[in-house]
Image (cartoon, rainbow, N blue to C red):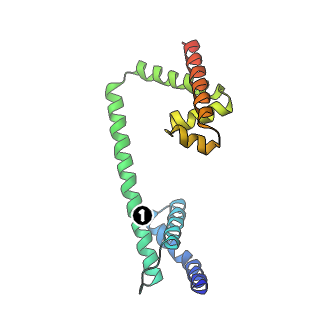
Amino acid sequence: MARERTELHRDLVALVPQLRRFAYALTRHADDADDLVQATMERVLSRPMPDDVELVKWMFRVSRNIWIDDLRSRKVRRDAAMDIAAENELDVSTEDRVAAQAALRRTQEGINALPEDQREVLAMVAIAGMAYREAAEALSIPIGTVMSRLARARAALAAHLEAAT
């Protein structure tokens, strides 16, 4: 089994230049081609190889499928961004946009002024949406400490924003 795995790795390495040329033909950009090759190699190494399949054909098929999935997801994100931009242009005046940017800048200044431990908890819970328990486990601290730091962070941020207006 280990010998077969070693041979597979050796075969994969030998196919990288050919796969990279294929990826470049699909993407037309060197950086995107490198990312596609990496994603293909990760996928090929993380899944069992189908029986009776030629490695090179399988790798090309995997690479092509990853590329198609990426194109589809880019289109969805681009369309969503265009929809959001169109909504924002219609609904928000210049004054409102400037006021929102100023509020965002004041908020970021307030977050940056927090002590590191409070900033970490605020980022995990209020920004990233982690549960208190998840944040406590990630930071290796009691859940009460998370709650306390979060309360102090929110109070300090509110005071900062109140003073700024």
Quadrant where the image shows the C terminus: top right
Residues packed near mark 1 inside 10 Å, few (<14), some (14 to 19) or many (20 plus): many
Q: Quadrant of residue 79?
A: top left
The residue closer to the viewer here, 22 or 53, is 53
> Which residue is found at the position 57% from the left and 25% from the top?
151
> Which residue is found at the position 53% from the left and 70% from the top?
41
Residue 24 is situated, as x and y percent measured from the top left of the image, at 49, 67
Q: Quadrant of residue 1?
A: bottom right
The answer to whether residue 82 is left or right of residue 156 is: left
Residue 35 is situated, as x and y percent measured from the top left of the image, at 53, 62
> Which residue is found at the position 47% from the left and 81% from the top?
56
Residue 4 is situated, as x and y percent measured from the top left of the image, at 57, 86
The number of callouts visible is 1
Residue at disc 1, secondary structure: helix
Q: In which quarter of the image is residue 141?
A: top right
Against 155, residue 89 (above or below) is below
Against 85, residue 105 (above or below) is above
The residue closer to the viewer here, 73 or 22, is 73
Against 100, residue 54 (above or below) is below
> Which residue is found at the position 51% from the left and 60% from the top?
32
What residue did someone put label 1 on? Answer: 67
Tag 1: amino acid: Trp
The residue closer to the viewer here, 87 or 160, is 160
